[in-house]
């Protein structure tokens, strides 16, 4: 599924953000380049509302901000690496460096859950996390994710 959703235009090795809200906004900007986000303000509201309900900062420097929203008609996702640590209310209390954002339509549960599960399985692997963090270009970052 990652292979179907991610393209070099949707990954960056240089996320410019210092705070959680800045990171969410920058990731959303990246998603908006697809033309598939019909309403940026609605998408941002839904992302921030989901953050209030459930912390999306995981462990091992990973954050997966996500939301179901009427702002998209199909699942969209992006990946970014920040060179600076960003506090993301992570489960282990450590800052995040690897970010995966996804938006999916409110009426579809399957693709959303499959995507999150695939990302979770992939990023459990320390070698994959290292390859992601060491990537120097969007193409290298994409290869780390989809092989």
Image (cartoon, helix red, strand yellow):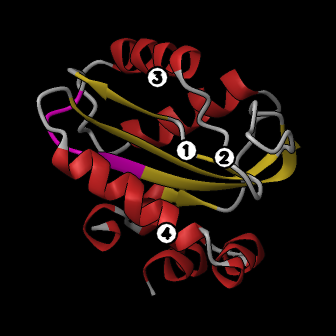
Q: Is 11 rendered above or below residue 51?
A: below
The answer to which quarter of the image holds residue 46 is: top left
Q: Which residue corresponds to the image point at 30% horizontal and 28% vertical from the top-left?
A: 68
Secondary structure found at label 4? helix
| Magenta segment | 72-77
Distance Cα–Cα, label 1 vs label 3? 11 Å
Residue carrying label 2: 58
Q: Between disc 4 and disc 2, whose residue precedes? A: 2
Residue carrying label 1: 64
Secondary structure found at label 3? helix
Neighbours of disc 3 within 10 Å: few (<14), some (14-19), many (20+):
many
Q: Which residue corresponds to the image point at 74% horizontal and 38% vertical from the top-left?
A: 90
**In front of the other: label 4 or label 1?**
4
Distance Cα–Cα, label 4 vs label 2? 13 Å
Residue carrying label 4: 121
Neighbours of disc 1 within 10 Å: few (<14), some (14-19), many (20+):
many
**In front of the other: label 1 or label 2?**
2
Q: Are marks 1 and 2 in contact (CB under 8 Å)?
A: yes
Total number of numbered discs in the rendering = 4
């Amino acid at each position: 599924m990652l292979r179907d959703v991610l393209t070099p235009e949707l990954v960056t090795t240089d996320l410019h953000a210092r705070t959680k809200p800045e990171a969410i906004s920058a990731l959303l900007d990246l998603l908006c380049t697809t033309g598939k986000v019909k309403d940026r303000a609605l998408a941002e509201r839904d992302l921030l509302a989901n953050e209030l309900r459930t912390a999306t900062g995981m462990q091992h420097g990973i954050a997966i901000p996500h939301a179901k929203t009427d702002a998209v008609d199909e699942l969209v996702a992006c990946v970014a690496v920040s060179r600076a640590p960003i506090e993301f209310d992570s489960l282990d209390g450590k800052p995040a460096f690897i970010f995966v954002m996804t938006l999916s339509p409110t009426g579809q549960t399957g693709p959303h859950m499959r995507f999150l599960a695939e990302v979770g399985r992939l990023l459990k692997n320390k070698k994959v996390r290292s390859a992601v963090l060491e990537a120097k270009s969007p193409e290298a970052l994409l290869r780390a994710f989809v092989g």
